[in-house]
Image (spheres, grey):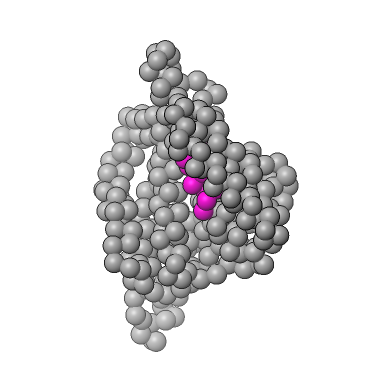
Amino acid sequence: VTDHVGICASVSSLYSSLALWERSPKRACAMHQRRLAVAAPLLAALNPSVYIVAHKELGMELGQAAQEAMDLRVSAVEQRMEADGKPLTGRELLSMNLLADQALALYNHFLRCYDVEAQLEEAVAPAKKPEDSAAAAAAADRKVKHSPAAPTCIRTREAMIAAVAQGAVAKADPEIAKTGGYAGGDVSKPLMGATSLDDGTIEAFLTAHFCIARLLGKRIDPANRVRDAMESLMRYKWLLKYAPTILSKAPEGCFEREMAMCKEMVELLPQKISRMHYGGETFGMLG
């Protein structure tokens, strides 16, 4: 099994290297899609309780493959529109959104390899006096009941894109879809065998969250453009809240540029969302 996973990973890496030398965005996009076809079925076949390391490696690599394929597809569409002056077609829109959804599903799968919700919540929670515990618990219960749209934990955050991810899984591979998602189970909860973060995975973990925020902002969905923008904003806010705690064990300078971009997006997105809601402004790959 390990040899087979290694061979599939090597084939995926080969296509990735070939795509760097390909001048045609369309052909390069096809190479990245081939990476998905070769390695994605492994996520359904491998038991995460036993092969959690393989799930981590494949989830991240395939998420990047889908994201790169999406970027190349966008580049090809932009070149076509510039050449013939014709507007975006429905088929082009569908293909770009499908790749974005696949990347969302795969990054989500990578994040499911970690179970750090309780650890992070405890780390950022203010110190409480013993006599205040009952009152705090009651207040927290009221907050959960009356503020369902303002989650703070990783598992609930993943639930926001669970529907998108599940749909992407079904389109990416019908056989995988039969199991209920990559490795089966609820796509909003950690996988069986999920581990805690360690020094070597902190940057990848935060990068996956950052990529999800960007992808939610790149989808072109006129009916749900405000929803996508809101979820993107919530992801950036999540990073600003929890990333400093996670990065306390990381080398200096790790994820520094991305944190600066998160701060900018948290400042800019509320105004952009308002313009989209009231003025019909676009928000997406070609917006």
Q: Give the residue drawn at x 62%, y 68%.
A: 193
Quadrant into which the C terminus falls: top left
Measuring 40% from the left and 61% from the top, which residue is drawn there? 203
- Identify whether 282 is placed above or below 230: above
Which of the two residues, 58 or 162, is positioned nearer the viewer here? 58
Q: In the image, is residue 120 above or below residue 65?
A: below
Residue 37, how many percent across, how many down? 63, 41
| Residue 166 appears in the rendering | no
Magenta-drawn segment: 60-69
- Determine whether 165 is above or below 71 in the image: below
Pick the residue in front: 165 or 253: 253
Locate residue 27, reporting x and y percent.
52, 29
Q: Quadrant of the N terminus?
A: bottom right
Q: Please give left or right for residue 201 compared with residue 274 in the image.
A: right
Residue 206 magenta-highlighted: no
Residue 112 image-quadrant placement = bottom right
Where is residue 192 drawn, in percent x and y?
Answer: 64, 66
Can residue 246 be spotted in the picture? yes
Q: Residue at x 51, y 33 (%)?
A: 29
Q: Main secondary structure of the magenta part?
A: helix
Q: Nearer the viewer, residue 77 or 57?
A: 57
Q: Residue at x 45, y 49 (%)?
A: 212
Outermost residue toward the bottom?
A: 130
